[in-house]
């Protein structure tokens, strides 16, 4: 009887030790996951692309073209309002959620050396300005200024003018 009780106690201790080890590993993994999430660069703007309803786009120093979303469709609002390429404007709005590869303070750079004097393109989403500079020498990435920070984002987020069918308002 005594040996059965000793075996039971030894088995219980082993289970408790194993359970404590599993709990410790889960706690360490959770801590690391939270730390990684806090260190991640995040997106270009703290703005949901679906909430974007005003866009201004200036490419290569040309005057900005202004767009507004009305009844689920995008319209050029400069001059006589007319419908424009909904898909392309949705892509421009998606730029707000562009995955940033890294952030650095703007003071770490000379703006002219990274193509920000003047910027290749300026995209404004609901009043938040994004300036696009040169592509990076390290790959298909582009330097982008947002406020006082410079982000490195995938080059496919570089704005291009909308194309496609445009209709007059009638």
Image (cartoon, grey):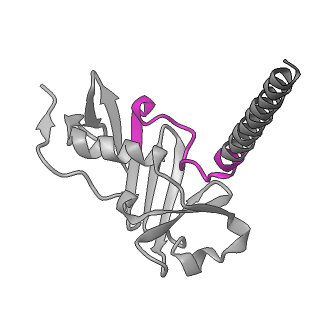
Is 117 left or right of 77, judged from the image as shown? right
Please tell me in which quadrant of the rendered image residue 82 appears: top left
Q: Residue at x 68, y 44 (%)?
A: 29
Does residue 68 sit above or below 134 in this rendering?
above
Question: Hey, which residue is sitting farthest right in the picture?
Answer: 2
Q: Which residue is farthest top?
A: 1
Question: What percent of the width, then of the height, locates residue 128?
Answer: 54, 44
Residue 49 falls within the magenta-colored stretch: yes
Percent across and percent down for residue 154 are: 43, 62
Q: Which residues are the magenta region?
A: 35-55
Residue, x 27% and y 56% (percent of image)?
161
Q: Quadrant of residue 84?
A: top left
Residue 75 in view (yes/no) = yes
Nearer to the camera, 13 or 55: 13
User: Residue shown at 43%/34% (left/top)?
Assistant: 52
Image quarter in which the N terminus is found: top right
Q: Is residue 90 above or below residue 109?
A: above
Counting every numbered tag in the picture gives 0
Q: Position of residue 12 (x, y in %)?
A: 79, 26
The answer to which of 69 and 78 lies nearer the viewer is: 69
| Furthest residue in direction front, as rendered | 1
Q: Nearer the viewer, residue 150 or 117?
A: 150
Residue 63 seen in the current view: no
Q: Residue at x 12, y 37 (%)?
A: 167
Residue 161 lies in the magenta stretch = no
Is 84 on the left-hand or right-hand side of 65?
left
* Nearer to me, 52 or 11: 11
Taking the image as shown, residue 5 lies to the left or right of residue 158, namely right
Image coords of residue 86 (percent x, y): 23, 38
For the C terminus, the quadrant is top left
């Amino acid at each position: 009887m005594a040996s059965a009780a000793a075996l039971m106690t030894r088995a219980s201790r082993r289970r408790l030790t194993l359970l404590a080890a599993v709990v410790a590993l889960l706690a360490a993994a959770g801590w690391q996951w939270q730390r990684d999430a806090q260190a991640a660069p995040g997106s270009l703007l703290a703005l949901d692309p679906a909430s974007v309803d005003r866009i201004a786009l200036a490419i290569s120093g040309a005057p900005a073209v202004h767009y507004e979303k009305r009844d689920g469709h995008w319209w050029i609002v400069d001059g006589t309002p007319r419908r424009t390429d909904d898909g392309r404007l949705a892509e421009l709005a998606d730029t707000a959620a562009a995955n940033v590869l890294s952030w650095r303070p703007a003071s770490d750079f000379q703006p002219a050396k990274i193509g920000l004097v003047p910027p290749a393109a300026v995209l404004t989403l609901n009043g938040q300005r994004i300036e696009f500079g040169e592509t990076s020498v390290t790959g298909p990435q582009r330097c982008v200024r947002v406020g006082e920070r410079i982000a490195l984002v995938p080059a496919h987020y570089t704005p291009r003018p909308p194309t496609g069918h445009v209709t007059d308002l009638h």
